[in-house]
Image (cartoon, rainbow, N blue to C red):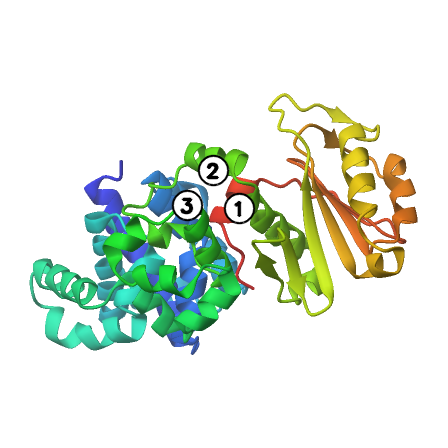
Amino acid sequence: MITLSEKHKLYYYFSYILFYGFKYGCSFDFLERRLSSSSIIKTIEKQNDCNFLYDSTLSDSIKEIYGLVQLFDDDIVAQSVYSLWISEAYLKLLFEYRKPLSYLFLYIPLKEMLRLFSPYHEMDWTHLYAEFERRVEQTSLLRAILDKENVSINKLSQLTGISKNTLTTYLVDERLRAASFENIYKIANVLELDIDIFADHINAYNEGEISDNLIKNNDLLSTIALYMVSYYSSDISNRKYVYDNKEKIYKYKDLRLKVLFTSNNKEAKETDSINLEADRLIEEYAKHIKKEERKNYVIIINESNQISNSLSPYKKWLNFGFERIFILNSENIICIKEDYWKSNVSISVVENIKNRVIS
């Protein structure tokens, strides 16, 4: 739990970071995206603590958020009144409503908070709370998101594969709160949003709930598999694959991407040998595609029954003629193609869902 004295330290710490962004002309959109995705804010939101204040410096935080070293001396920051007030305003809203910063920016963007400084900075904080609640009641969450992202219901339907009628019902907050986790994830994924923006409170989507949904839902797993592969392969991320619910495959022009699943095994062991079940799956799938058409297919094997560490046993899969094949498990992403690329970066599906990278 964050103490009162620690909250005051947070207000000043956050205000320095804001001051830096204002001083060096960062756009409001840039500031909102970088701040919302920063590990500092995630620590405050999720863990409700500020231990990082004792483990890192202001320069460390500025470097993480802005990608630059601190360009001014501490004594130059004769803390501007407006950046301190804005810092305290957002953090008070966060603590009061347990909503992520991305949600707060949606209803009171930085530009608007600057405008509210003049009428509200000498008033009691309850006036700001009332203003925030008024804005939330005025516009539904999905409508606010679509307006900010400049995306229509029709476009969102195309991107997610969710019907226009279903998405239209989500324009009512009560219906959106009742939406399936799968649909919530799809919307968050295509719009590059932190999934917690849809939650009733910050910790609503816990790891257990996400994991249960993953195990039970192959369509959702397919979406996550594509996201993971796109994260490590820029040419695939540039393709605007759309999921065909009927055929259970992703399509982009004449290109296809198919995710195949091995049986789930929570006791999966690391090995350098071939996965016999995956071997059977891909061989059976290849039989249904003409050899000359396989070059247009990317195959992802979601390997839940084994953790593969070696490429060697899988090189024979090159003979199938697919554009490339990925093996995805809880430790690696392995890509099988002519140059035998492998990512050695350890991955966590849950963390990659929650901590979206904004370049």
Question: Could you tell me which secondary element the residue under label 2 belongs to?
Answer: helix
Dot 2 corresponds to which residue?
213
Question: In the rendered image, which quarter contains the C terminus?
Answer: bottom right
Callout 2 touching callout 1 (CB < 8 Å): yes
Of the image marks 3 and 2, the number of the one nearer the N terminus: 3
Residue 12 sits in quarter? bottom left
Is the residue under label 2 in contact with that under label 3 (CB below 8 Å)?
yes
> Looking at numbered disc 2 in the image, what kind of residue is underneath it?
Asn
Q: What residue appears at the point 45 percent right and 57 percent down from the top-left corner?
A: 188
SS at circle 1: helix
Mark 2 vs mark 1, CA separation in Å: 8 Å
Identify the residue shown where x is 11% and y is 59%: 125
The disc, 2 or 1, on the residue closer to the chain's N-terminal end is 2
Q: Position of residue 14 (x, y in %)?
A: 33, 58
Q: Is residue 183 left or right of residue 16?
A: right
* Apparent side of residue 332 relative to residue 322 in the rendered image (left or right): left
Kind of residue at badge 1: Leu
Q: Are marks 3 and 1 in contact (CB under 8 Å)?
A: yes
Q: Residue at position x 56%, y 54% from top? A: 245
Mark number for residue 181? 3
Q: CA distance from mark 3 to mark 1?
A: 9 Å
Q: Amino acid at mark 3?
A: Phe
Residue 220 circle label:
1
For the residue pair 43 and 320, the one nearer the viewer reads as 320
